[in-house]
Amino acid sequence: MTRGFFVTIDGGDGAGKSLQAKRLEESLRADGIPTLLCRDPGSTRLGEAVREILLGRREMQISPRSEMLLFMAARAEMVCETILPALEAGGVVIADRFLLSTLVYQGIAGGLPLDEIMQVGRVTVQGRFPDLTILLDLPAEIGMARINRPLDRIEQKGLEFHKKVAAGYRRALDLLAEESGTAPLRIDAARDPDAIAAQIYAEVIRRLPPRAEGGRE
């Protein structure tokens, strides 16, 4: 059974995660590499329904612990239904957010104990942590100023909350690296998007195991 390669792109709101995840998918597919792009929460019927509750219901008050459990439920379904089958087939999976986001948003910024989140996270991901976690590092003021659409429920939590998020990523990144045994990649997200995309592509290509390269050995 081929293991495939699992990469996640994470960071604060406005850092450009979705753009860079899409560009990486397009570049890998152009090389003939089987690639699956998924978003967390989302990418399954359950995940999209939970996403609407967590992000779309702007009027709804949800505690950090309930947020954490909802994110984990959507993530567990995505791991089971989409991520693991794609990896077992030898493809590359790109996730727009993953466990790191929950450690930061509901943990460091939301006040939940990180060890509690990690305990649930281990069960959720079934021991399959990313092979590469990419953090797009950007000050909260810049990220929030980039958003030119109506803010979702979590984006509406205010600048001070998002400053805690931006500052918390480095601490959570170290914790996740210790748990997963893989070194993360931190990128300055204030740089030109084309330069960022080129760096991400080069770093992923360099790390791909031969069998995940779709016969390009």
Image (cartoon, rainbow, N blue to C red):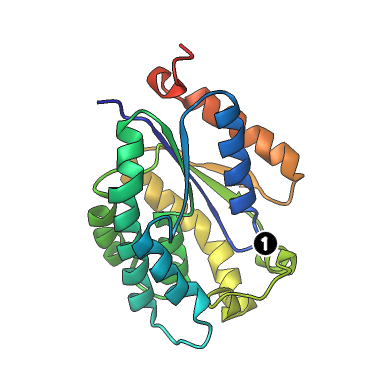
Q: Is residue 123 left or right of residue 8?
A: left
**Kind of element beneath mark 1:** loop
Q: In which image quadrant can residue 49 be found?
A: bottom left
* Residue lying at 55% horizontally and 70% vertically, measured from the top left: 164
Q: Is residue 207 above or below residue 153?
A: above
* Residue lying at 74% horizontally and 39% vertically, measured from the top left: 194
Residue closer to the observer: 89 or 196: 89
Q: Which residue is mark 1?
A: 139
* Residue lying at 66% horizontally and 76% vertically, measured from the top left: 150
Q: In which image quadrant can residue 113 be found?
A: bottom left
**Does residue 107 show up?**
no
Q: Is residue 34 above or below residue 127?
A: above
The residue type indicated by label 1 comes to Pro
Residue farthest along the top direction in this orientation: 217
- Could you tell me residue 83's position as x and y percent? 35, 44
**Does residue 182 show up?**
yes
* Mark 1, other Cα within 10 Å: few <14 / some 14–19 / many ≥20: some
Q: Is residue 26 above or below residue 47?
A: above
* Residue lying at 55% horizontally and 30% vertically, measured from the top left: 29
- Could you tell me residue 99's position as x and y percent? 39, 56
- Could you tell me residue 196's position as x and y percent? 68, 40
Residue closer to the observer: 25 or 169: 25
Q: Quadrant of the N terminus?
A: top left
- Could you tell me residue 97's position as x and y percent? 48, 54
Q: Is residue 166 left or right of residue 182?
A: right
Q: Is residue 125 left or right of residue 186?
A: left
Q: Is residue 40 left or right of residue 22?
A: left
